[in-house]
Image: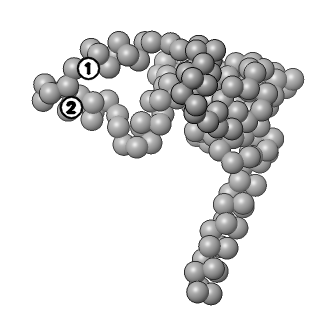
């Protein structure tokens, strides 16, 4: 029992040290367009937008969110989901962009090569997937859906 407790404490300490190591560090926007939020919630107001590859400095870490400051505009600060940032420098002038969903799927091992292999077997209709991905839902529509379904707003 003591060993398990010790292991849990070590893991917690490592997570705290990892988060602290990123505080003050440099990160880069890993998606096409990143909205900086006023707080750590999906429906928080947007303070500004950063483009793919933009450099930011980490001010603080709170769970899965980071408060960051834009390197190009020091007066622009806000909160961003950690999944939308990377510590790897983005090459200037790169035309490759990724959405937040693509970054999440890539983290799970889904990439263009995997998609092509699924397409080649003819079992899946990717036209419908592509059509679905183009649909946009406003925050107001999403809030109404959550409210009408008696769902939790989350953070």
- The local crowd at label 2, few if under 14, some if 14 to 19, many if 20 or more residues have their Cα within 10 Å, is some
Q: Is residue 106 above or below residue 133?
A: below
- Check disc 2 and report the residue beneath it: 118
Residue 11's disc is none
Q: Quadrant of residue 85?
A: top right
Q: Quadrant of the C terminus?
A: top right
**Residue 81 to residue 6: above or below:** above
Toward which corner of the image does residue 18 lie, by quadrant? Answer: bottom right
> Position of 73 compared to 138: left or right?
right
Q: Residue furthest bottom?
A: 2
Which element carries disc 2, helix, strand or loop? helix
Question: Are circles 2 and 1 on residues that touch, CB within 8 Å?
Answer: yes
Q: Earlier in the sequence, mark 2 or mark 1?
A: 2
Residue to which mark 1 is pinned: 126
Q: Give me the residue at 45% from left, 12% from top.
A: 135
Residue in view at x 79 percent, y 44 percent: 60
The secondary structure type at the circle numbered 1 is helix
Q: Position of residue 6 (x, y in %)?
A: 64, 80
Q: Nearer the viewer, residue 98 or 148?
A: 148
Task: List x then y, in percent, for residue 88.
Answer: 58, 40
**Residue at point 62% right, 73% down?**
8
The relative height of residue 22 versus residue 113 in the rendered view (above or below) is below
Residue 47 visible at all:
yes
Quarter holding residue 64: top right
Q: Is residue 107 left or right of residue 154?
A: left
Percent position of residue 121, x then y:
12, 29
Q: Is residue 33 visible?
A: no
């Amino acid at each position: 029992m003591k060993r398990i407790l010790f292991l849990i404490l070590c893991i917690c300490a490592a997570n705290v040290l990892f988060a602290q190591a990123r505080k003050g560090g440099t990160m880069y926007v890993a998606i096409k367009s990143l909205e900086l939020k006023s707080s750590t919630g999906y429906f928080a107001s947007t303070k500004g937008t950063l483009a793919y590859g933009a450099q930011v400095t980490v001010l603080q870490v709170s769970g899965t969110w980071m408060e960051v400051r834009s390197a190009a505009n020091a007066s622009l600060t806000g909160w961003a989901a950690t999944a939308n940032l990377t510590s790897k420098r983005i090459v200037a002038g790169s035309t490759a962009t990724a959405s937040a969903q693509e970054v999440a799927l890539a983290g799970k091992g889904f990439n263009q090569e995997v998609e092509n292999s699924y397409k080649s077997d003819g079992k899946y209709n990717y036209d419908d997937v592509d059509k679905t991905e183009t649909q946009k839902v406003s925050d107001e529509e999403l809030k109404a859906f959550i409210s009408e379904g008696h769902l939790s707003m989350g953070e």
